[in-house]
Image (tube, helix red, strand yellow):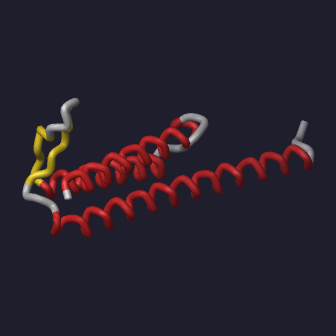
Amino acid sequence: MGMGPWTQGIKFLYAKVELADMERTTAALLGLLAVATIVSVAAYPSLPGEMAMHIDVSGDMSNYLPTPIALIVSPLVIAGILIYNMAVPRDQRGRSDMGLLMLAGVLFLVHVGFIFLNV
């Protein structure tokens, strides 16, 4: 028993929506990566030689990293999330890309926050 035209049409539309969803996720991740990189490059001249990566309850900064390493870690992780998003088929990743976007978004906000705390 073959598929009727309605079934074929629904499968076609579902495939198009899934592809558009993936392209939006990829575009959003690329945007986060680009902005994180631009912020890092723009802030680099005004940052100290070492950046604080931990702030305790009393507001004291501790656990320092060399500035170049601190500035490149988050964009590299976002790039890894982007590569994962593009390389692994969606059915193996789960139902939604929202988790990837949330992870990259939080990482981006933490990255920018630590840059501004160290300027």
Residue closer to the observer: 82 or 8: 82
Residue visible at 36% across and 54% down in the picture = 79
x then y, percent, for residue 73: 24, 50
**Residue 106: image location, x then y, percent:** 41, 44
At horizontal 40% and vertical 52% (from top left) the residue drawn is 83
Residue at the outermost top position: 57
Asked whether, in this view, residue 44 is left or right of residue 8, the answer is: left
Q: Residue at x 16, y 53 (%)?
A: 69
Image coordinates for residue 34, horizontal then vertical, percent: 38, 64
The quadrant of the rendering that contains the C terminus is bottom left
Residue placed at 40% from the left, 47% from the top? 81
Quadrant in which the N terminus appears: top right
How many numbered circles does the render carry? 0
Residue 4 higher or lower than 67, as above or below:
above
Quarter-of-image position of residue 98? top right
Nearer to us in this view, 2 or 66 = 66
Q: How far from the left and from the top, in percent, is residue 13?
A: 78, 52
**Side of 90 where 112 appears, left or right:** left
- Give whichever of 30, 109 is nearer the camera: 109
Residue extending furthest toward the front? 58
Left or right side of 19 for 107:
left
59 or 91: nearer the viewer: 59
Please identify the quarter of the rendering in which residue 97 is found: top right
